[in-house]
Image: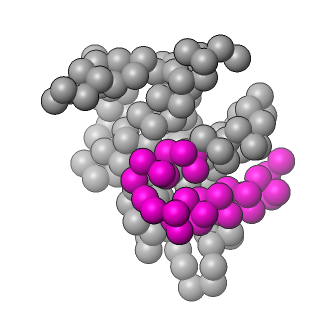
Amino acid sequence: MSKAKSQARSAARLAAVQALYQQHMEQTKLVKLLDEFHQHRLGREIEDDQYADANVPLFDDIVSGVDARRDEIDGKLTEKLAEGWSVKRLDKTMLQILRAGTFELMARPDVSVGTVISEYVDVAKAFFDDRETKFVNGVLDAVAKAVR
C-alpha cells in the first residue's frame, strides 16, 4: 500500500474516533455527523491545523458501523474488560477508540488483526500515555482472539 493511501486510512481512523466522540457527547444524528465531517473536517484546515486527507469510505464505514452495532460492540468489549469494569467507566475517548477497533475486527476481515491493533494504538497515542496505549493493545488483542 502506498504511503499516501496508508496515511489516508490512518487519518480516517483518527477522524472516526473524533466523530464518534462528538456523537457520544452531543447525541448528533449519524447523517448530520457524517455531513459535518465531510464538509468541514476531513482534509480541511481548522485553527491552523491541517487535517490530513482521509479515506472517506473507510471513515463512513467505521462511524456508520459503530453506530449500527454499538450494543454488540459494547457487549464484546465488556466481555474483555477486567471484572468490575464496564464501558460506562471508560474514558469517553478511550471508549470510542475501542469501539472503532472492535468494529473493524468484527466487520473488516480485509484488514489484518495486526494492522487494526497497530492503527488504534497509534490513535490512542494521540490522546494518551504509554499505559493507556498498552490497554488498547491488550483489549483489542483479546477481542481479536474472540472474533477472528
Residue that appears at 82% across and 57% down: 145
Residue at x 65%, y 14% (from the top left corner):
2
Q: Nearer the viewer, residue 54 or 50?
A: 50
Q: Percent position (x, y) of residue 1?
A: 70, 17
Whether residue 133 appears in magenta in the rendering, the answer is yes
Magenta stretch: helix, strand or loop mostly: helix
Report whether residue 103 is seen.
Answer: no
Picture quadrant of residue 112:
top right
- The spot of residue 4 in percent (x, y) is 55, 15
Q: Which residue is more in the foreground, 120 or 109? A: 120
Looking at the image, residue 138 sits to the left or right of residue 91; the answer is right
Query: Does the segment drawn in magenta span residue 72?
Result: no
Q: Residue 124: give x, y in percent of width and height.
A: 49, 52
Q: How many marks?
A: 0
Query: What residue occupies the far left of the structure in this picture?
Result: 47
Q: Which residues are magenta?
A: 120-148
The percent position of residue 16, horizontal first and vertical second, equals 45, 36
User: Measured along the vertical axis of the image, is residue 79 above or below residue 47?
Assistant: below
Q: Residue at x 47, y 58 (%)?
A: 95
Q: Is residue 91 visible?
A: yes
Decide: is 54 above or below 101.
above
Q: Residue at coordinates 63% horizontally, 84% vertically from top-left?
A: 83
Is residue 45 positioned above or below 66 on the image?
above
